[in-house]
Amino acid sequence: MPADLFAPEMRPPIAPEDRAGPRLWLRRLAIFRDPHTIIRDVSLKPGLNIIWTPDMSSSGSPALAHGSGKTTFCRLLRACLGESGYTTDVQRSRILSHLPNGMIAAEILIDGSCWVAVRPFGLPGGEFVVQAASVEEAIARGRRDSDQAFIDPMLIETFFPMIARATPPEVSHEQVWDVLRAWLTRDQECRLADILAWRSPQTQSRSRAQVLGETAKLTMLRLALRALDAEEQTAALRERKLVVAAEDERRRQAYQQKRYLDGLKVVRAALSAGEEVGFDDTIDQKGLVSLAEAALAEAMRADLPKPPDVGSIFARLNALNEERRTLEAQQQGAVKEADVKRGEAERYSAEANLGEIDISQGRVRICPICRVGVDEVRAKGCGISLERCDLDALRTTIADKLGKAAQLAGEADNATQEAKRLEALIIQLGPRHQALEGEAKDADAVNRAAQAAAKNVQDWIYQARRILDDVRTLRDAETVAKPTPPATAALDAVRAQLEAGRSRARAAIRTLEEKYQGIMAAWLPDGVEGTVKLDGNGLKVDAQFAGRGEVSTAALDSLKIVAFDLAALHMAVEEKADLPAFLVHDSPREADLDGQLYERLFSLLHEWEDSVETPCFQYIVTTTTAPPRDLQTDRHVRLQMSSTPAAMRLFGMDI
């Protein structure tokens, strides 16, 4: 069978000639109980670094391969590379309870210069990064106010100056390494589910990538792969704005259409017109405008009821009330006059009675001056008065008073009779007053009914006029109300620009795809093909068996993600991507991934590092499955742990 000249081939990455090693790699990671006591000291190297906790099939012991600290090792490594949260809050409390003065430190090589990152396990504020020969030297020097807290600014300036000027709005200049670090050191909890699955919320890493949307992460990935230029970015931003504007226009038109249909339904109901009736007249029927005009004319012709003349009724009632008030005043005057004259008569009568005139015997028994018996005065003389008692004059005075009393009593009786007469007249006014009040009440009811009827007519006219106005407005808005698609010319133009940008990006994507296909060909059995596609729906990596189409299982899906990351690492080594050639995979094997396939991962990376004197990349992988036998050496297995005994765990104790 002839060889397939176009079959993909995986060649080890070739770094530029002036590169003598990785631009970024970790030389050492140390865990301290206190500034003077090291618990764990892990040396790393360029190329392949294996962190291994043997499973039962490899170790020959009943010790579990889980719980030894592989993921924690990756988290501590990420913390030294600037990630804020080095573990979950619960685990952090446990670590602090055992290591209150503990810390981690890493020697980070950047373009040949050694930088040491120191992170205490305690509260934030004690971390620092300094250029030093070793972690011991940095710890002995201590933190100074001028020191950087994290290594992010240095890495951004060294590796990402171009990306930092082109980030999406959701990613600030200071967050560039935070986001890309999440890609290069994926969470084990994400289970290699997707090329953009980098940080799981349950890890509490507080990374920006943990809350970043898919679009922003894809933009950052494409920027790093040099598969996105400024023109396409501008077009993408313009497209988002146009899509938002188009959606707003669609909602506005939908709202207008609903208002139009609701208004049309209301006027049809008011005019008792069916759905078939249009705005204008036809040969067969009147239109809505004519029906509304006719309804208004009919309302205008409605007779308004004439209210009764209540003014004359109230005038007569007022005159009657005035007459009654006059009679009542006269009656009260007669009663008062009778009382006054009767009182005067009683007074005169009382004065006359003081003389105690004995009419029957014709003599005065008591002197009206001294109140002594007259006979006694005559016999003995008066000891009080110097005047002589004139009995005749006294009799005349008494007689006058009695006459005056009789006259006043008669006048009082006449006044009483006049008061009774006036009272009778007042009583006679009652039926007339009641009749007028009833007439006024009836007239008022009729008047209110007339006013209500007039208001109904006015409302009828108002509603008819409003319906006519609404019909005319709806007719004018008929063309506007008909939904029209949002303006798409600008959107089509910007999407054409996006497609042109993707076409330009396809060169970089094609390079990525070639690396990806080569890795898949070297890793998987013959007949497996890999593809990388960039379109309007995003970036997609696939693997398919020739003649069978795409095949998807949990193991194969995770393998595709690992191959994608390795392809990006390959490009970074050859400096065809704006990335450091640095990659960490935490337990990348899914349960049903074939063991021989998994071994090829280690062999592939070993081929890459073995093809040169000093590899220009660093790949760190944790595993429970044994690596190939020829790689189970101290050169490649940089740390071997076990869940039991406790001394074999990462911290050398129970945490």
Image (spheres, rainbow, N blue to C red):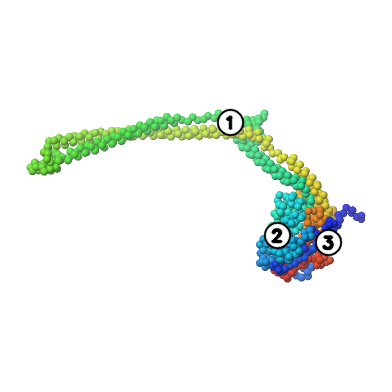
Quadrant of the rendered image containing residue 581: bottom right
The residue identified by callout 1 is 296
Q: Of the residues shown, which amino acid type is indicated by label 2?
A: Asp
Image quadrant containing the N terminus: bottom right
The one nearer the camera, 385 or 499, is 385
Helix, strand or loop at label 1? It is: helix
Mark identifier at residue 614:
3
- In percent of the image, x 66 and y 66: which residue is there? 100
Q: Position of residue 4 (x, y in %)?
A: 89, 54
The one nearer the camera, 308 or 68, is 68
Image quadrant containing the C terminus: bottom right
Whole-angstrom CA distance, mark 2 to mark 3, is: 32 Å
Nearer to us of marks 3 and 1 is 3
Mark 3 and mark 2 in contact (Cβ < 8 Å)? no
Quadrant of the rendered image containing residue 70: bottom right
Mark identifier at residue 147:
2
Q: Earlier in the sequence, mark 1 or mark 2?
A: 2
Crowding around mark 2 (Cα neighbors within 10 Å: few <14, some 14 to 19, many 20+) is few
